[in-house]
Image (spheres, rainbow, N blue to C red):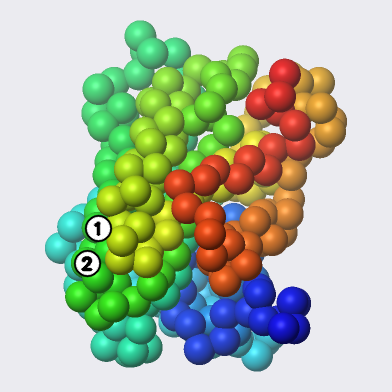
């Protein structure tokens, strides 16, 4: 056994990355492509930069426009992936949004939108992928991008809709892991801490300064520091791991 390419390689596999137009999804899509997978990027905008990066690295990728909260669009998108690539082996459910607002100031519509993208989107994509995997006898791997906010209430910003959505994603992960174990489909999650992307970098400086002393490693993570965790869960290296959450947060939830 060549442990490097044999265990972590994805050659001949097809991976779907939701929200791959920027941030964590963009970097992980590149990592999956470099590991040998053909990558389908599902997001609303054209992920030009991601496609260019993957092509420059000698990888294969294409875009399918879809809102993860739209069941009809997602079903059509994953059917198109199966038609185009002949398989659907890995799904990285990464599309997500966050709204910082005190609960009494936020609207019910804002609550619903966050739950719709983060939780319902993860459910809708997983359901469509699970169906294809079961029907085609594919022993796939689904990886949900949760958050440390699904385990702890990180402060000082108020984001109860986000925290609740990510806690639900963690239990959805465990529920599907048990339900689909007999089909050879594994379902796991990663829980990033503060990671330098548009979602966290565009936040006000004083908020970021409040975060750093609470992180044992005293810095934010970089998207590329999540690639190893996803490759582990996507590949044969984690063949006996299902229902697990891999926390990548510089030690935040330990305190
Ligand atoms: P980001 O830079 O804001 O990127 C979000 C991605 O999601 C974009 O590609 C966006 O593409 C896509 N997206 C948003 N709504 C969508 C929808 N309805 N349908 C399809 N795609 C949608 O965010 P990020 O920081 O990389 O975060 C990615 C994931 O990591 C999220 O689930 C987030 O909760 C999680 N996370 C982030 C951090 C952090 O500190 N950054 C920490 C923990 C967890 P389009 O706009 O083109 O659709």
What's the distance in space between the residues labelled 1 and 2, CA to CA? 6 Å
In the image, residue 175 above or below residue 208: below
- Write down the quadrant of residue 220 in the picture: top right
Residue at 65% across / 56% down in the picture?
A: 229
Residue 197 in picture, x, y percent from top left? 64, 48
Pointer 1 local density, CA inside 10 Å: few below 14, some 14–19, many at least 20 = some
Instruction: Name the residue tied to disc 2.
Output: 131
Q: Is residue 54 left or right of residue 116?
A: right
Residue at 69% across / 61% down in the picture?
A: 228
Q: Residue furthest left?
A: 72
- Write down the quadrant of residue 255 in the picture: top right
Instruction: Name the residue tied to disc 1.
Output: 127
Q: For the N terminus, which image quadrant?
A: bottom right
- 49 or 134: nearer the viewer: 134
Q: Are marks 1 and 2 in contact (CB under 8 Å)?
A: yes
Residue 53 in picture, x, y percent from top left? 64, 78
Label 2 secondary element: helix
Pointer 2 local density, CA inside 10 Å: few below 14, some 14–19, many at least 20 = some
Residue 145 in picture, x, y percent from top left? 50, 49
Residue at 15% across / 63% down in the picture?
A: 72
Q: Is residue 18 visible?
A: no
Q: Is residue 194 visible?
A: yes
Q: How many marks?
A: 2
- 115 or 85: nearer the viewer: 85
Q: Is residue 212 left or right of residue 248?
A: right
- Write down the quadrant of residue 22 in the picture: bottom right
In the image, residue 156 above or below residue 130: above
Label 1 secondary element: helix
């Amino acid at each position: 056994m060549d442990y490097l390419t044999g265990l972590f390689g994805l050659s001949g596999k097809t991976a779907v990355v939701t929200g791959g137009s920027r941030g964590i999804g963009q970097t992980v899509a590149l990592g999956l492509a470099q590991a040998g997978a053909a990558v389908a990027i599902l997001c609303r905008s054209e992920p030009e930069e991601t496609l260019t990066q993957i092509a420059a690295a000698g990888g294969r990728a294409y875009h399918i426009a879809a809102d993860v909260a739209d069941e009809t669009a997602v079903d059509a998108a994953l059917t198109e992936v199966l038609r185009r690539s002949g398989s659907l082996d890995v799904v990285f459910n990464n599309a997500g949004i966050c709204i910082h607002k005190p609960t009494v100031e936020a609207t019910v519509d804002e609550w619903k939108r966050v739950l719709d993208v983060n939780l319902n989107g993860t459910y809708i994509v997983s359901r469509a992928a699970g169906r294809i995997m079961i029907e085609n006898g594919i022993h796939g791997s689904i990886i949900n991008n949760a958050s440390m906010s699904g385990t702890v209430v990180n402060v000082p910003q108020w984001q109860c809709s986000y925290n609740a959505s990510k806690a639900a994603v963690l239990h959805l992960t465990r529920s599907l892991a048990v339900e689909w174990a007999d089909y050879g489909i594994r379902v796991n999650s990663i829980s990033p801490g503060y990671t330098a992307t548009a979602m966290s970098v565009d936040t006000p400086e004083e908020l970021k300064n409040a975060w750093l002393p609470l992180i044992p490693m005293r810095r934010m993570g970089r998207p590329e520091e999540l690639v190893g965790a996803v490759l582990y869960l996507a590949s044969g290296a984690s063949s006996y791991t299902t229902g697990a959450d891999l926390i990548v947060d510089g030690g935040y939830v330990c305190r």
